[in-house]
Image (spheres, grey):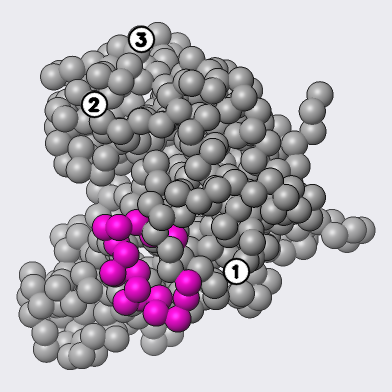
Amino acid sequence: MVVVYNVVDYLEKTSKKYKHKIAVIEEEKTITYEKLNQNSKIVGSFIGNHYFNEPIIIFMEKGIDALISFWGTIYAGCFYTLVNPELPEQRILQIKEKIHSPMVITNGEYYEKALSFFPDLKVKKIEELTTGKVHPSILKKSYQNHIDTDPLYVNFTSGSTGEPKGVVISHRSVIDFIDIFTKLFSFQSSDIIANQAPFDFDVSVKDIFSSFKVGATLVIVPKKYFSNPAYLLDYICKNNVTTLTWAVSALCLITTFHGLEYKVPTTVTKVLFSGEVMPINHLRQWMEKLPQANFVNLYGPTEITCNCLYHIVDRSKVYEKIPIGKPFPNERVILLDEKNQKIKKPNKIGEICVGGTSLGLGYYHNWKQTNNHFVQNPINDYYQEFLYRTGDLGYYDEEGNILFHGRKDFQIKYLGHRIELEEIEKAMMDIPKVIRSCCVFDEEKSKLYGFYIGDILKKDLHLKLKEILPVYMIPTKLIQMDSFPMTKNGKIDRKELQKRSKGVGKCYSMNT
């Protein structure tokens, strides 16, 4: 058995075994494993001549060029963070301030924009970098100086302080997870994996590294197709896709608009979903149309490297609620009650806490948040054992499966993203004429409501929010109020606002 310490070993092995095989398809553009590996080494040689174990910003949309940039960064012994050029200016600048990167890789399309955002950094076009040469001595030095706990990537998530948090994930964590993940769900070189998730969202980690681990073909689905289910299904069928590792919202997009009545992707044999609670009726439609496919519910925060729990859907069962399941091999998942005692009995609700080799290294340049969330296991007084407290609540069923039971605090899962409601509230409060704000989430309807007090029209507030927040963080509905309901303790009564968002409870003066 060959022990892997660096994920470049995946690409090295696969590119030798499948030289001329198509590694990635991006609409009409393709690249072989050999060519992708060669270009990655060229980029890695340039970066490695200047930096080691430094964060490199990849400033472009997902695609073949982004993958070459990722692998080039890895060959250099550095770690990457993808910054989507479509993010609001404030968000991009916040990430720049956090990551302290010396270099940006972009492409011709976003070069000028990159220069405007990163005038003090080295900005290079991927088109120019790939015209260079491979320098084996530079790559060898980077490889020899690497250890498996070095960072591989930093993905930024929403933060409760109003600033994004960068989750740092190491090579060892990804290797540990991907080796188990691909074996458990029988990923093969014959698989054609359709990538749905953006490359700055950790669902894509499963697509990217599973593909390169086993020598599969990765099909990058353009974002524009997710606004047209017919085009989306045509693209999946045209490429004979076998595997969908998608967010629940993406699968539901197709069933919501009756896409499976138009065309069924009959080559699909694996459907793995995560990010939100899967509605039973939507899952049933997929299962009826793909009677030979395996369906798996996945659960896990970015901080545990993609997932820590899984449940293979049993076609012989009638589900009222789909379990998030049992732990992956080599991952520890426990439920803790309010007294930090381990829950063992069924139907008792506790916080989901996770640990193991796949646990992240913490939040980049953010010790306070790291120490708040990556904590010593409270039931272990004998040696250091870190757990990540997810803030999610769950309970065991009679078979030992964990079922999801909502959020402990005000962090939510919305459109497949983890979002801190406080960050949206802070963004609203930063807008002139907004006096107070409060956000609530209707999990049943998957709708986000933004309540506010202030002299600003809803349409104007919506436009302002689009300038500073990603689209998925903008409330579904903005509701203007004269005053907020208050609890006896003098706090905003969020439960009352939840009722009001559903059209029940006391009626307060508001403009809807």
Which percent across, then down, holds residue 205?
A: 51, 42
Within the image, what quadrant is residue 285 found in?
top left
Look at the numbered discs 1 and 2 and tell me whether their residues touch, using CB distance below 8 Å: no
Coordinates of residue 227 in the picture (x, y in percent): 17, 41
Give me the C-alpha separation between circle 2 and circle 3.
21 Å
Decide which of tag 3 and tag 1 comes sooner along the chain: 3
For label 2, the residue is: 235
Residue on which disc 3 sits: 291
Residue at the image point whose x is 81% and y is 24% from the top: 1
- Chain part drawn in magenta: 105-122
Kind of residue sitting beneath label 2: Tyr
**Residue depicted at x 22% and y 74%:** 467
Between 473 and 399, the one lying in front of the other is 473
Mark 1–mark 2 Cα distance, whole angstroms, equals: 37 Å
Crowding around mark 2 (Cα neighbors within 10 Å: few <14, some 14 to 19, many 20+) is some
Depth order, front residue of 148/464: 148
Residue type indicated by callout 3: Pro
Query: How far separated are the C-alphas under marks 3 and 1?
Result: 44 Å
Instruction: Answer with the quarter of the image where residue 58 lies.
Output: bottom left
SS of the residue at dot 2?
A: helix
Q: Nearer the viewer, mark 2 or mark 3?
A: 2
Q: Look at discs 1 and 2 and give the one toward the viewer.
A: 2
Q: To which residue does mark 1 refer?
A: 364
Residue 107 part of the magenta segment: yes
Quick check: marks 3 and 1 in contact, CB under 8 Å? Answer: no
Q: Is residue 349 visible?
A: no
Q: Is residue 268 visible?
A: yes
Which one is in front, 480 or 36? 36
| Residue 324 in the image, given as x and y percentages of width and height | 52, 36
Give the answer, above or below, for where 216 lies relative to 450: above
6 on left or right of 130:
right
Marker disc for residue 74? none
